[in-house]
Image (spheres, grey):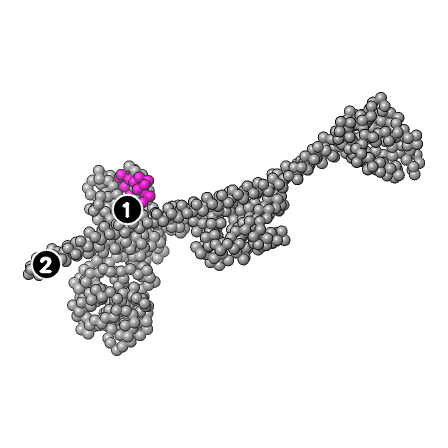
Amino acid sequence: MSAVFSLSQLAPLSQRLDWQRNPLGDVADWPQSLRTCVQLLMNSPMPMLLLWGQQLTQIYNDSFAVLAGDKHPNAFGQPVHQSWPEYREFTQPIIDAVLAGESRTHVDQYFLIPDRQHANEMWLDLTFSPVCDESGTVAGVLMMAVKASRRRRTAIKLRQRSKATRQAQHDTEERLRLAQTVTNGVGTWDWNIDQDLFVTDSRFAQMHGIEPQLSGQLPITAYLQGVHPEDRGLLTRSIKACLASNGEYAEEYRLLDADGTIRWVFARGRCFSADPGRAQRFMGAALDITERKKTEQALLHLNETLEERVAERTQALAEANVQLQREMQERERAEDALRHAQKMEAVGQLTGGIAHDFNNMLTGIIGSLDLMKRYIAAGRSAEIGRFTDAAVSSAQRAAALTHRLLAFSRRQSLDRKPLDPNHLVTSLEELFRRTKGAHITLDVQLGENIWAVNTDAGQLESALLNLIINARDAMPQGGTLRVRTRNSYLDGTDISTLEPVKAGDYVMLEVSDNGSGMTPQVLAKAFDPFFTTKPIGQGTGLGLSMIYGFAQQSGGHVTITSESGNGTCVRLYLPRHYNLQVQPRPPVTRPDAPCAIEGESVLVVEDDPAVRTLVLNVLDELGYTAHQAPDAKTALALLESSLRIDLLVTDVGLPGMNGRQLAEIARQQRPGLSVLFMTGYAESAIEREGFLDTGMDMIGKPFSVDKLATLIRAMIPAKTQA
């Protein structure tokens, strides 16, 4: 999800959507064409909307969300006609054409979008383009919007100005009152119809191209000579209609000067008569409106060319978007290559570290066993003790490394129990003091009324001890090592981790020092497996990665802050446990391996022959009757027989039917049968809680003979004595 929506403000909304129930399906299953298109529009500053699939499901970017008003956020991820039913009549023909492979452009479209308490008016230029899937079939519609409101407002202002001009002109003409107003820009006339005398002022004569000395009492036909030939007929008909109705007259017409210049005139007049049925005088005024006409024609030309300019700009934007899409594809390919290189580097570092450490340990084991064989063959069996100790020591180190790998990968089996963090730290304080060295001051600060946590005490002790050792190594010249506990509430924004933080109560355990600290480059790799700044042989590089895995598997988090020369602070957050009854940890005892009671029988189910032989030999040494099976199918035949079986010892990760399923069926055949699970790695057995029922327990591989014998002895009496 972060890869598709990571740069968008809509990322949280996309994470909350139930994509499984959405027509588009889970984001991880989207076709590459859809993912690429979504990434393009999410990274675009232009308002963009994608309609995909048969349901025309909407995906849009931050800029479009602003235009959507109250439709957002409910419209995101929903069918377009469900969210915008009021515009279906407009959009459906466009969508049908685009799905058929055509493109559509619509300029200056008006929309009224509700937004909270009011509605917003907006004008948009819209471009609709088809989007194809991997097979070349049109699968979606991509709409780009360009705000045209500013241009629209400018055009409205121009028209308003033009209207205002006409209104002013009208008001002026009304105030003329027929020959009572004479100005430099207005010419007047008075036509005596009975005498056919047309009396004008000099301004009117000048407009119509009459010499000033000739202006005066001339026939009206003389003044029609200056009118444009194409307008003479219209003007004559208008005047006759006015005379016939004995009413008012208003007309616009053109004048043609001797040099070919065309000018526009607006004339308004009225007929007067003592006899209502016949006009006797026709009086009026004329105004030169040439400049106004030029303005109107310029505005008309602007409107005529506006669509063409918008189309050109839209085409340029489309070409820019195509180029942007190509650049996005190139960037995506480069990012994929970088991620692959980083992944291979991490895998190489991980496998190299494992190989290095295991080779050292296997050398100790194989070399010791080889020398033991040589000494036995030479009759020197009494001298092989030191080689036995060396082999066991190397094997134990290998087991510890495996345990750390499981902790890092969050696949270890946690034995969760409620515990008091303050009590745990107090019980470890003496160990911390012995570990830190005399040159370092230990400062333990325990918070008051610290909440209980539900976790694996052994893993938590190991994590804290690792942090104490790291702090000690960072202060070779001495310093202060601080261990602190505190109740904390995290709301999801307090700390920054790769995994999301669930809001709630946590207990914080902090280990900090004022030592050498880390550079930003080292800090960025602090949790990487096998990354260490210590010399070869002085650290595996699994300490912090193990703590990180343990924290995440426990439902918590771990953070680290450091600055070169100013020390390091590691904080481990574990979820609060609300069961107030915390059981004290029983003292650890190591009794001798107990033997079997006569007649007790154990069924061992293990697919690994070496492990199966080892367990059978242990049981034989302890006096148990042992039965064996390499898989669940063979074991079921023995369980259905009349054999006495007091305990089922089974590996969890069996081929076919696993050990947990075998235990369920076995208990149906033999109710109350005790079951001991063995596990080296089993994803279903990571958590004891919820995996183990009453009468069940678990032992992790590798295990010692004493531990296995003690656990077997502890599980059988409850059965035999019942």
Mark identifier at residue 374: 2
Is 708 displayed left or right of 114 in the figure?
left
Instruction: Looking at the picture, tell me which residue is in the foreground, 544 or 524.
Output: 524
Q: Residue furthest front?
A: 259
Label 1 crowd bin: few (<14), some (14–19), many (20+), radius 10 Å: many
Residue 453 image offset from top left, x and y in percent: 33, 54
Please report the residue visible at 25 percent of the width from the left and 66 percent of the height from the top.
Answer: 606
Label 2 crowd bin: few (<14), some (14–19), many (20+), radius 10 Å: some
Helix or strand or loop: what does disc 2 sit on?
Answer: helix
Instruction: Looking at the picture, tell me which residue is in the foreground, 82 or 484.
Output: 82
Residue type at tag 2: Arg
Q: Quadrant of residue 242?
A: top right
Q: Is residue 500 above or below residue 605?
A: above
515 within the magenta span: yes
Q: Earlier in the sequence, mark 1 or mark 2?
A: 2
Label 1, label 2: how many angstroms apart (C-alpha)? 39 Å
Is 232 displayed left or right of 627 in the figure?
right
Q: Residue furthest bottom?
A: 642
Please report the residue visible at 28 percent of the width from the left and 40 percent of the height from the top.
Answer: 517
Q: What residue did someone put label 1 on?
A: 531
Please report the residue visible at 24 percent of the width from the left and 46 percent of the height from the top.
Answer: 469
Q: Which residues are magenta?
A: 512-527
Residue 328 image offset from top left, x and y in percent: 46, 45
Q: Is residue 301 above or below residue 456?
A: above
Residue 614 image offset from top left, x and y in percent: 19, 65
